[in-house]
Amino acid sequence: MGLHCGYIAATASQSDLMAHLARHTGEFEELETHARTEDAEPDGGELEVAVGEHDGRAFLLDTSFLLSSSEDMIVALSADLGTVLGCGAETVSGSFWLTLARDGELLRMIFVQRSGSTRGMAIGEPLPFEAETPLDDPFGDGVFAALRGLGFDPGPWFDSGPATVYRYTCERSPAAGPIAQLQREHFECYGRPEGEWLGEVTVTARPMG
């Protein structure tokens, strides 16, 4: 199986998260609200997101990967929303990302893209969950370990709903900043030649039981 989506979680209401997110990205068109979160899974090809809240936490399901992996935007959001986490995985290509920020300060950033670079990138001190389940777990379990370990367990929202689907109008992309610049420099040093990673693809089966 594996994981093929990203998440943004914040110590904020759903409405506050969407309002501040729109300042960085342009508007989101509200489409429909579902009583069950599982019925609101967005179509990544349409740049749709599913958003909800539970127990003072807002959650955004990002199947496009674009928003949850915008590290500089996550830090900027935290200046208004308190603690903000952006994380996700695309396990087929070996891509994993996490940005944790609080009150405008970056606390931890991890970016691994095996298809594009020979080394992962990390900023900040390792988080407690990483010792047991690293973010780049091949099945995507590290993403949920991060969410739970940092106080953003999405399980209750998944179970209870509701979830609202929005379409991202793509008026503009999140602005790049100093973290994006560090990523560019990282890829200049450790980037793979195009197509090289295909020779290293292996199939990993999840143990049963």
Image (cartoon, grey):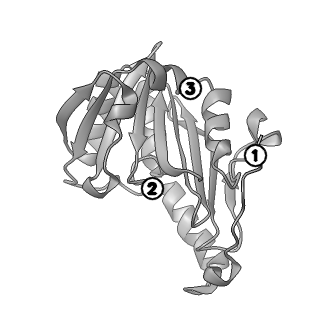
Write down the residue under mark 2.
177
Residue type marked 2? Gly
Q: CA distance from mark 2 to mark 3?
A: 26 Å
Q: Secondary structure at mark 3?
A: loop
Write down the residue under mark 1.
208
Which quadrant of the figure contains the C terminus?
A: top right
Mark 1 or 2, nearer chain start: 2
Nearer to me, 189 or 158? 158
Residue type marked 3? Phe
Q: Residue at x 36, y 40 (%)?
A: 41
Density class for disc 1 (Cα within 10 Å; few <14, some 14-19, many ≥20) is few
Q: Residue at x 35, y 54 (%)?
A: 175
Which residue reaches farthest right? 131
Mark 2 or 3, nearer chain start: 3
Q: CA distance from mark 1 to mark 3?
A: 27 Å
The image shows residue 134 at horizontal and vertical percentages of 74, 47
Which residue reaches farthest front? 209
In this rendering, would 74 be left or right of 198? left
Work out whether 163 lies above or below 85: above
Q: Are marks 1 and 2 in contact (CB under 8 Å)?
A: no
Q: Residue at x 61, y 42 (%)?
A: 143
Q: Secondary structure at mark 2?
A: loop
Which residue reaches farthest top? 55
